[in-house]
């Protein structure tokens, strides 16, 4: 399959005019369903708007889990949030620097073992509910955290803001955080 342009969004992008998004040639959207135990307040409106405009969607959940059981609970909250919507693309687990910083403030150190344990707990829960599961990471996390043998069965969403990706094996590449769409007054993560 060739290059297909998409966006990923959250409450920071607001509720979009999906006819303008479609007119700009965007072919898919990955929409944040929530973070920690909280649903993204723009998720439902954006998911329904994208679907109504004929743009396939997936979802992601930004993790604040302190352990694998917490990641499973986040997956369950995500599944509850997306239920009844036509989610035709993967549901991604998003464990980033802020996840680690938050845990550290709670007295919990999260490293490579936790990244993989949490990712598997989330993704297996999502798969059991009938969705495609995926994991998001950047080059630093790919080099320090990702255990490919444990995460190989999930869709790989790789983030590196560059003209070319430094690694291969990804399914989805987030290549910019400063994309624009005519008629929309916010910047976009481009994939």
Image: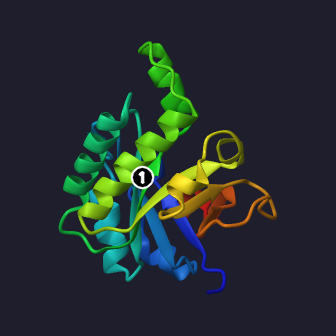
> 10 Å neighbourhood of mark 1: few (<14), some, or many (≥20)?
some
The residue located at (55%, 71%) in the rendering is: 6
Check the image and report above or below for 52 versus 71: below
> Is 26 on the left or on the right of 73, as rendered?
right
User: For mark 1, what is the residue?
Assistant: 14
To which quarter of the image does residue 190 belong?
bottom right
Can residue 43 be seen?
no
Can residue 66 be seen?
yes
Image spot of residue 137 (x, y percent): 59, 49
> Is 14 on the left or on the right of 21, as rendered?
left
Q: Residue furthest bottom?
A: 1
Check the image and report above or below for 66 versus 23: above
The residue located at (23%, 49%) in the rendering is: 76
32 and 149: which one is in front? 149
Image spot of residue 185 (x, y percent): 55, 57
Which quadrant of the rendered structure holds the C terminus? bottom right
Image spot of residue 47 (x, y percent): 32, 65
The residue located at (24%, 56%) in the rendering is: 79
153 and 157: which one is in front? 153
Image spot of residue 167 (x, y percent): 75, 60
Check the image and report above or below for 144 versus 105: below
30 and 78: which one is in front? 78
Which quadrant of the rendered structure holds the N terminus? bottom right
Kind of element beneath mark 1: loop
The residue located at (52%, 56%) in the rendering is: 151
């Amino acid at each position: 399959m060739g290059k297909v342009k998409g966006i990923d969004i959250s409450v920071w992008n607001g509720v979009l005019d999906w006819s303008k998004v479609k007119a700009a040639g965007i072919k898919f959207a990955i929409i944040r369903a929530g973070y920690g135990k909280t649903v993204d307040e723009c998720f439902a409106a954006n998911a329904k708007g994208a679907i109504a405009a004929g743009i396939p969607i997936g979802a992601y959940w930004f993790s604040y889990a302190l352990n694998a059981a917490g990641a499973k609970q986040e997956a369950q909250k995500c599944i509850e949030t997306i239920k009844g919507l036509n989610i035709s693309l993967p549901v991604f687990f998003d464990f980033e620097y802020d996840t680690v910083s938050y845990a550290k403030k709670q007295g919990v150190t999260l490293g490579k073992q936790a990244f993989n344990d949490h990712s598997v707990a989330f993704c297996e829960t999502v798969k059991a509910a009938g969705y495609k599961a995926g994991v998001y990471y950047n080059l630093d996390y790919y080099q320090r955290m990702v255990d490919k043998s444990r995460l190989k069965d999930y869709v790989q969403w790789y983030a590196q803001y560059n003209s070319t990706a430094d690694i291969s094996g990804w399914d989805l590449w987030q290549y910019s955080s400063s994309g624009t769409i005519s008629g929309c007054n916010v910047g976009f993560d481009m994939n």
